[in-house]
């Protein structure tokens, strides 16, 4: 086994390459990306990079000296258009053919576009890449009014940045509350209020029916006929996993590239990691596809271990975070199916935790601006600790006392 090709230049792909070297792999490693930047971290894009507080170079996970020192070849012109499984080779857009012994797909996902006329206008932006954010920043420099479609992490983080830049911001969420897919009504209400306190016009249950104006959009039309003036429109309505390459190659795909607990696809010579994968999770007893950095990193390490014959199943408890204004939301576990929420602390203090219980077991937790409790909450969820609402709500007793001995 001398040649490993990694398709995808994000954090998962970079981590596979770095971890292979740490584990002693001495063969060729090539990362094929389709962006000119070196492998970079995406979370800061909607936060510090959008705000102009981080440079592009600061996003890089592997700068040129690290690539050189580890003998990792990165090609930003390496868009792969096909996989020849029989010959174990990939075909590039430029006509090149590269052979592999093991192929790793870390193709991630792409921002879901808005399916409306006008969505291709130059001042209507998705937010997924450095190029996306560079274009948004250029438009924001001369804008006054920003309309953000989508009240998830991306939309709310972008709203916080735009308000800090002094712009008029409206957030339009089609569901009855923001963050509805990931958290409880209590946490949603807290963040809605936080944004309104900063001057954001948060509209929930808002259905966008039109983007009006040409050649640039200057109004966003709602289902009730209202037209909201806009200089810039940012769309944050979810992610589409990049599975087309895998599907065209005949690999099993079902809401992601289907892999086993060791990161192997239905072809033993092709592995996958990150946002693009659908993997079995022992903790939840079912298959899931996760969009999170820690999932990408941990699954990438699992894949490199598998390649090196050091199989170790991936079954980490998922966790997520979001920075909005001076608030840090950290979440662990998946709260779906919970029976009861327990508040620990006082929301008015802007520092608290919310625990999700099912059958008396802590299955997930949200913490706001409380990293210490978050670290304990991760252990509580991972250990499936049983606790009463009274125990969790009692701030006079340290959470750590609930941990198993």
Image (spheres, helix red, strand yellow):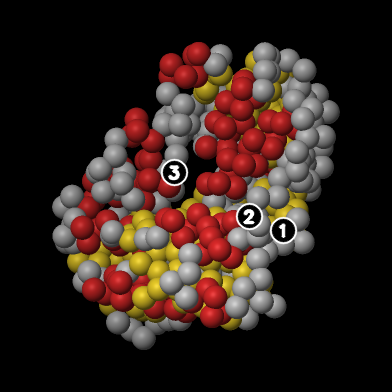
Q: Is residue 247 visible?
A: no
Question: Mark 2 packing: few (<14 Cα in 10 Å), some, or many (20+)?
Answer: many
Q: Secondary structure at mark 3?
A: loop
Looking at the rendered image, the quarter that the C terminus falls into is bottom right
Among the 4 quarters of the image, the one containing residue 273: top right
Q: Is residue 224 positioned above or below 140 on the image?
A: below
The residue singled out by tag 2 in the image is 317
The residue sitting at the bottom extreme is: 224
Residue at left offset 80%, top offset 24%: 87
Question: Mark 3 packing: few (<14 Cα in 10 Å), some, or many (20+)?
Answer: some
Residue nearest the viewer, comparing 113 with 405: 405
* CA distance separating discs 1 and 2: 7 Å
Q: Is residue 62 left or right of residue 140?
A: right
Residue at left offset 42%, top offset 23%: 63
* CA distance separating discs 2 and 3: 21 Å
Q: Earlier in the sequence, mark 2 or mark 3?
A: 3
Where residue 283 is drawn, which disc sits there?
1
Residue at left offset 27%, top offset 56%: 161
Assess whether mark 2 and mark 1 are in contact (beta carbons under 8 angstroms). yes
Q: Is residue 247 left or right of residue 30?
A: right
* CA distance separating discs 1 and 3: 27 Å
Question: Mark 1 packing: few (<14 Cα in 10 Å), some, or many (20+)?
Answer: some
Q: Secondary structure at mark 2?
A: loop
Where residue 42 is drawn, which disc sits there?
3
The percent coordinates of residue 78 (x first, y second) are 55, 27
Q: Earlier in the sequence, mark 1 or mark 2?
A: 1
Among the 4 quarters of the image, the one containing residue 94: top right
Where residue 28 is drawn, which disc sits there?
none
């Amino acid at each position: 086994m001398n040649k490993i090709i990694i398709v995808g230049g994000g954090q998962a792909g970079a981590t596979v390459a770095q971890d292979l070297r740490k584990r002693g792999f001495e063969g060729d490693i090539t990362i094929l990306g389709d962006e000119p930047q070196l492998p970079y971290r995406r979370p800061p894009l909607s936060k510090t990079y959008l705000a102009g507080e981080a440079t592009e170079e600061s996003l890089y996970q592997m700068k040129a000296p690290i690539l050189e020192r580890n003998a990792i070849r990165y090609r930003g012109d390496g868009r792969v258009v096909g996989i020849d499984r029989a010959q174990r080779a990939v075909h590039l857009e430029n006509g090149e053919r590269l052979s592999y012994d093991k192929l790793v797909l870390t193709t991630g996902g792409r921002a879901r576009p808005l399916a409306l006329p006008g969505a291709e206008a130059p001042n209507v932006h998705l937010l997924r890449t450095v190029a996306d954010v560079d274009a948004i920043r250029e438009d924001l420099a001369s804008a006054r009014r920003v309309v953000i479609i989508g009240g998830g992490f991306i939309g709310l983080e972008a709203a916080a940045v735009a308000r800090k830049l002094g712009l008029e911001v409206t957030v339009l969420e089609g569901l009855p509350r923001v963050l509805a897919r990931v958290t409880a009504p209590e946490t949603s209400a807290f963040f809605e209020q936080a944004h309104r306190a900063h001057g954001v016009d948060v509209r929930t249950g808002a259905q966008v029916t039109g983007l009006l104006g040409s050649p640039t959009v200057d109004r966003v039309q709602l289902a009730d006929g209202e037209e909201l003036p806009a200089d810039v429109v940012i769309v944050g309505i979810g992610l589409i996993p990049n599975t087309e390459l895998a599907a065209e190659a005949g690999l099993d795909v079902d809401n992601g590239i289907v892999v086993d607990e060791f990161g192997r696809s239905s072809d033993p010579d092709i592995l996958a990691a990150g946002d693009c994968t659908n993997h079995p999770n022992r903790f939840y007893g079912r298959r899931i596809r996760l969009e999170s950095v820690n999932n990408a990193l941990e699954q990438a390490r699992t894949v490199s271990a598998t390649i090196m014959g050091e199989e170790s199943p991936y079954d980490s408890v998922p966790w997520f975070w979001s920075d909005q204004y001076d608030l840090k939301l950290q979440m662990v576990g998946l709260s779906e199916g919970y029976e009861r929420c327990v508040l620990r602390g006082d929301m008015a203090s802007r520092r608290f935790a919310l625990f999700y219980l099912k059958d008396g077991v802590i299955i997930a937790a949200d913490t706001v601006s409380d990293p210490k409790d978050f670290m304990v909450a991760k252990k509580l969820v991972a250990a499936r600790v049983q606790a009463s609402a009274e125990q969790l709500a009692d701030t006079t007793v340290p959470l750590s006392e609930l941990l198993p001995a």
